Image: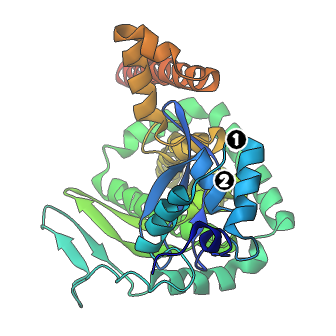
């Protein structure tokens, strides 16, 4: 039997435990929120009005009470049919308390490998979240401001010192590229630094209540790198937590270099070991700092997206710029914040790429001439 409008509006529905709601995100001309299903389910976007309603489904308020709040905020009352559609959508996605959970996607047992020998992935641990939880428990005493702040100061001082010796580092790195055995050793250490980079993302996510779904190896021969998939970084409580998780990898890269800096500083100029360490320090610093650039798919791009609260920053900036060139009325219809963000990022990222190309060309010229 279908409930009457009065009976429907007296209900006090609640979201299932584990449903995650993101803060407001700019996506194209619209403001949206992400809703993530529990138990590792997918995410979908809703508008600001739908979010207003869904976020208030806590089991303590009736639909009539939420409807009054909605009318006070948006100046429009909701009909029973609107509530029925919304509850049907949430129920179909098993997002309401009491609804049966959606069946998990079928994953063939014992098949951590996917892809081909030339391009694919390999899961390295059966339970990535449990692994990062154990790592977090071990490292938790060090994840405190009195520890992290001095380390950050040391890393900044390291980069300043290396910048003052950049000519020597560049010459030694050029020499290193002519020493196959030493070069292999340096790149092995840099690969290990990359693995620590990925684990740092996972540990920092666990520190702030995030979850990790997968740790593995991804390759596109001849390149193979570790990866760590953090499921819910977009739903962490504060913007600062999101930024820390995104920046933890570069922090780990620079931290990895600190012991080698002391070794390098203790050796005289021209010493072969110092030259090898020069290459490690220069290439390792570039690995960390380049990763902080605000270009996809780098961590700096993720950090900027979190800072601006924007979803799809690069593609939406490109879309807006194309509208500016081909459909100005459509571009003018964007809200002011969207116009400023997309125009600034589109132009700024293009200038940054040109600057990087020029810097690379200058560096190669310096090495070849000297």
For residue 208, which numbered disc appears in the image? none
Q: Is residue 337 above or below residue 326?
A: below
Q: Is residue 127 above or below residue 202?
A: below
Rendered residue at 46%/61% (across/down): 85
Q: How is the image coloured?
A: rainbow
Q: Residue 308 at what x, y percent from top left?
A: 64, 38
The quadrant in which the C terminus is found is top left
Rendered residue at 39%/25% (across/down): 319
C-alpha gap between disc 1 and disc 2 = 10 Å
Q: Residue 362 at what x, y percent from top left?
A: 43, 18
- Do we see residue 261 in this rendering? no
Q: Quadrant of residue 323?
A: top left
Q: Residue 59 at what x, y percent from top left?
A: 70, 77
Characterize the local packing of mark 2: few (<14), some (14-19) or many (20 or more) Cα atoms within 10 angstroms.
some
Q: Is residue 1 above or below residue 110?
A: above
**Camera-nearest residue between 131 and 72:** 72
**Camera-nearest residue between 73 and 195:** 73
Q: Is residue 75 above or below residue 111?
A: above
Q: Nearer the viewer, mark 1 or mark 2?
A: 1
Side (left or right) of 178 relative to 201? left
- Circle 2 is placed at which residue position? 52
- Circle 1 is placed at which residue position? 74
For the image, the number of numbered tags is 2
The quadrant in which the N terminus is found is bottom left
Helix, strand or loop under label 2: helix
**Camera-nearest residue between 10 and 261:** 10
Characterize the local packing of mark 1: few (<14), some (14-19) or many (20 or more) Cα atoms within 10 angstroms.
few
Q: Are marks 1 and 2 in contact (CB under 8 Å)?
A: yes
């Amino acid at each position: 039997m279908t409930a009457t409008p009065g009976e429907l509006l007296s209900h006090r529905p609640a979201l299932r435990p584990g449903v995650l709601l993101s803060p407001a995100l700019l996506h194209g001309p619209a403001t949206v929120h992400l809703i993530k299903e529990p138990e590792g389910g997918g995410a979908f976007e809703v508008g600001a009005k739908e979010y207003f309603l869904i976020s208030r489904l806590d089991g303590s308020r009736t639909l009539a009470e939420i409807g009054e709040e909605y009318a006070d905020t948006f100046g429009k009352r909701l009909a029973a049919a609107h509530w029925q559609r919304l509850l049907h959508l949430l129920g179909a996605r098993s997002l309401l308390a009491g609804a049966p959970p959606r069946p998990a996607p079928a994953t063939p047992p014992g098949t951590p490998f996917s892809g081909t020998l030339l391009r694919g992935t390999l899961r390295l641990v059966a339970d990535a979240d449990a692994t990062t939880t154990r790592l977090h428990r071990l490292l938790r005493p060090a994840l405190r401001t009195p520890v992290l702040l001095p380390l950050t100061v040391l890393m900044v001082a390291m980069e300043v010192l290396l910048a003052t010796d950049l000519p020597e580092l560049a010459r030694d790195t050029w020499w290193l590229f002519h020493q196959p055995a030493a070069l292999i050793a340096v790149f092995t250490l840099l690969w290990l630094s990359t693995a620590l980079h990925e684990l740092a993302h996972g540990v920092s996510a666990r520190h702030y209540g995030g979850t990790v779904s997968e740790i593995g190896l991804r390759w596109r021969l001849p390149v193979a790198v570790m990866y760590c998939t953090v499921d819910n970084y977009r739903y962490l409580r504060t913007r600062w937590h999101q930024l820390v998780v995104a920046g933890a990898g570069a922090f780990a890269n620079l931290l990895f270099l600190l012991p080698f800096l002391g070794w390098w500083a203790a050796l005289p100029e021209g010493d072969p070991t110092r030259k090898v360490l020069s290459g490690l320090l220069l290439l390792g610093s570039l690995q960390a700092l380049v990763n902080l650039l605000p270009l996809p798919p780098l961590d700096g791009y993720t950090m900027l997206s979190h800072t601006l609260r924007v979803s799809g920053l690069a593609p939406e900036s490109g879309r807006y710029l194309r509208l500016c060139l081909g459909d100005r009325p459509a571009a003018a219809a964007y809200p002011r914040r969207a116009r400023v963000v997309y125009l600034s990022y589109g132009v700024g990222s293009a200038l940054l790429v040109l600057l990087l190309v020029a810097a690379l060309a200058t560096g190669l010229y310096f090495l070849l001439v000297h």
